[in-house]
Amino acid sequence: MKPKKPLPKNETFTGKNQNIHLSKGLIKPVISVLVLCLLTFITFYGAFDNSFVNWDDQVYVEEQPLVLNKDYAALWKTPVSLNYHPVTMISLALQVPKDTKKLSPAPLIKLNVWLHIFNTVLVFLLLWMINEKKWMVAIFTAAIFALHPMHVESVVWVSERKDVLYTFFFLLSCITYWQYVVTDKKKWIAFAFIFFMFSVLSKAMAVVLPLVLLLLDYWKGRKLTDLKVVAEKLPFLLVSLFFGLMAISVQGGGDFGGLLSLYGEKSKAIADAEAFTLLQRFQFASYGFIQYMMMFFNPSKICAFYPYPVSNKLDGLSAILYPLSAVAIIGLAIWSSLKTKIFTFGIGFYFITIALVLQFLSVGLALMADRYSYMPYIGLAFLLTYVADLWLAKKSKALQYGWFSILIIFISFLAVKTKSQVDVWQNSESLWTQALQYYPTDDLILANRGNHRGKTGNINGAMTDFEAAIADGCTRADVYEGLGNSYGTMSEQQPDKKNEYITKAIAMFNTALELEPNNGQVRYNLGVAQLQTNPGASVEAFSEALRLMPYKEANILPVLGLSQLNSGNYQEAIITLTKVISSGNATDAVFYHRGLANLGIGNRDVAKNDFDQALAINPANVDVKARLAAM
């Protein structure tokens, strides 16, 4: 047997010894990730007893028939709240209990938190992979992502399931794509494409993923002009183009050429082209670009809503400084590519993932939103930790310890602020009260808190909010509608002033309709207010509400039938109430009212049968008993 040659000094062992060495090398990163997951869970644990909030939760879950009825087929083809995200909506529907009376936000919020924890692990894994498995930079970046208070909105708000879900699939796509780049095995790019499809079906924001993949190519050193690099992105780009055009159609109130089914009232989220000038749009975009960066370092004044400036433009130095700063930062990032990749990569990741929500194309009512920072802050956090590790930590031990100390203090500050912000999302009262600290006269904030107060019985508080908004020159229909509802409630609480309050309620509803003539809910509320004092007018109001909101037929038909009964249109009332009974939504009141209508046209036997059926449903109905006794 030939003697084994000794290993050269610069060679390393392979096999079992190397595996042991690698295993030991993973101990610190794994423990660090587990500790971070635990800290994230503890920080967000307070959200588990939060309530639904009146900021889209009723649209997505609480009052969303497609979700409550688990109509998965309809959810696949129906935009909700001007967004097409069927995977998100189906994930919400899957968590709705069979008995919808037991519906609770707790399971929905818990899954959001777990998805956020999974995303934290994926952030670590992605950056660990692309940065030569240097775990310190990856763990600190993941910690900033996990514990940043700007991300509370995406995690604890039920309606933002789409954020944590699309990010989960987005990061998986990036990770599997990186595996493809490293190994050149086609299965990995196939997985990347599948995850991309799930991501874009969770939220249309994922359409930017092909650009992020090109950014990963740039980081790896691949030639972006290489035909192979371009060709392998074509399927991704085609999907992005398709879903991007779909999003524009849906946000504009369309059905994407008939491919989708519109459900509910037609509206749009994209502002008309003439609403803002190109200069204003550029100012808003640059303001957001810089302001999100500033809030990355100092998230001291965060809330659920950031309104546009009163003048719809930036004034003074802001009008110049924000655009110049944005252009300068982007220009420096591009110029720095000649010297180092990190600025181009970090700022590029931030810009690509936030560009669509910088309000150059104005979508929605808010100038900014905390949730828009969820993905983009990965780029800023990676840039911060990478640069410090590369240029500071390696200079000397003192700088290294100093940097780590500052970073730990910064992350601790973020965690404390995050825990506090989790409590702000406890309910609608605390949510909008915080927003009013920064924007005390904003109509939307006052309207939302007022509506919440009205629904929870704080009528005086609700009226205070609505009246404050109106005194400030409000032109929002929902404010006048809310005040009208408050007057309606007061009419029940103070019978001696009933007519006075009903008159005021009707005046508020009419003002709301002057602002939004096609608001079906206001038409419905107007009909309720007119039901006793002017039943003929209430018939007209309910009929118009039914035309505008056919999907709320089950709620409108019973009161339409009652208004027809009160106005003496007995035959029409019978037809309407029979339709309600045939649909399976009959109550004792519906049978009672149809019985009265039958009495009105002389059908005593039919009327008695209706009264008997009403009594069978509710034996304690004293009105029915009185009618039967009188027959």
Image (cartoon, helix red, strand yellow):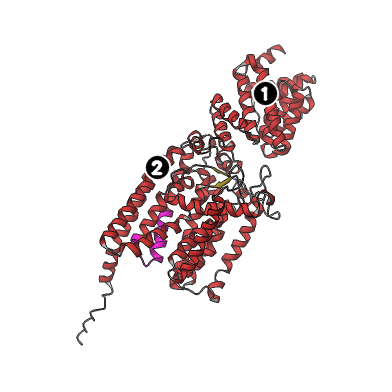
Closer to the camera in the image, 336 or 571 = 336
**Residue 609 seen in this snapshot:** yes
Residue 239 screen position, x and y as percent: 60, 62
The dominant secondary structure in magenta is helix
Q: What stretch is highlighted in magenta?
A: 119-136
Closer to the camera in the image, 16 or 295 = 295
Q: Which amino acid does label 1 sit on?
A: Lys
Q: Which of marks 1 and 2 is nearer the N terminus?
A: 2
Where 313 falls versus 129 (above or below)?
Answer: above
Q: Is residue 543 left or right of residue 220?
A: right
Q: Residue furthest top?
A: 630
For image coordinates 43% across by 72% down, the residue present is 183
Residue 126: within the magenta? yes
Where 455 falls versus 224 (above or below)?
Answer: above
Closer to the camera in the image, 387 or 412 = 387
The local secondary structure at tag 1 comes to helix
Q: Residue furthest bottom?
A: 2
Numbered label attached to residue 504: 1
Give the quadrant of the C terminus: top right
